[in-house]
Amino acid sequence: MSNVEGLDSLYKRLHAIGDTQAMLKHLQASTEAEAKARVPRRSGHLFHSIMRGRLTNTTAEVVARTPYAAAQEFGARPHVIKPKNASVLAFPATAGGRTLAGLPTVGARRNSPGLGRSTRRPAGGIKLVGLGQASGTMRFYRSVHHPGNKPHPYMIPGAKAAIAKSGEIITIAWNGAA
């Protein structure tokens, strides 16, 4: 069989399959579910950002809409983080001053200089934080040296698992089109 005959045979099968969009829609939904099952869960933000994107007759997209999605999938080198829209970066001083999502609690914001609107702020914004205390103050930095992170693949393995599980549906459509 020549390359031209093989290509003609491929086009005939693809044309006979007809509605490829239905198969791609199934693969897209399956990939979304598999990626969500594999994503590292800390705050749930990355998990909730995984969603279906564009769908055409030839492509189906599944996207993660967080700035750090690629760093989770592929890892990141050590790097410096600098503020973009402010002069400093602000972090809660203690674990008790953070919510599960890593955001500062109301108490941490209220007792820090320049944040919150409390009139009961200690002089100079300094607060001593004892063990077991629920909230603390904020710490401010001009830059932070991030140590980087190892890759935690979730999207590519999810897509591969979805294709493996959907292989039977694709094979039946392909063989039925012969």
Image (tube, helix red, strand yellow):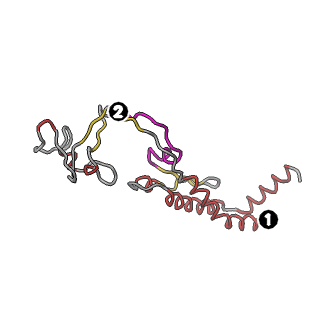
Please identify the quarter of the rendering in which residue 175 is found: bottom right
Query: Does the CB distance between marks 1 and 2 fall below 8 Å?
Result: no
Which mark is in front, 1 or 2? Answer: 2
In the image, the segment drawn in magenta is 65-84
Numbered label attached to residue 93: none
**As rendered, which of 134 and 61 lies closer to the eye?**
134
- Image location (x, y in percent) of residue 145: 39, 35
Q: Which part of the image, by quadrant, shows the C terminus?
A: bottom right
Query: Residue 21 sits in which quadrant?
Result: bottom right
**How far apart are the two marked residues, 1 and 2, measured between alpha carbons?**
62 Å
Q: Is residue 173 left or right of residue 52?
A: right
Viewer-nearest residue: 164 or 140: 140
Q: Residues within 10 Å of mark 1 (few under 14, many from 20)?
A: few
Would you place residue 170 above or below residue 141 in this image?
A: below
Q: Which residue in the protein does label 1 denote?
A: 178
In the image shown, does 151 or 2 lie closer to the viewer? 151
* Residue at left offset 36%, top offset 35%: 144
Q: Which residue is mark 2?
A: 143
Could you tell me which secondary element the residue under label 1 belongs to?
loop
Going by the numbered disc 1, the residue's amino acid type is: Ala
Q: Residue at x 58, y 52 (%)?
A: 156
Label 2 is placed on what type of residue?
A: Ser
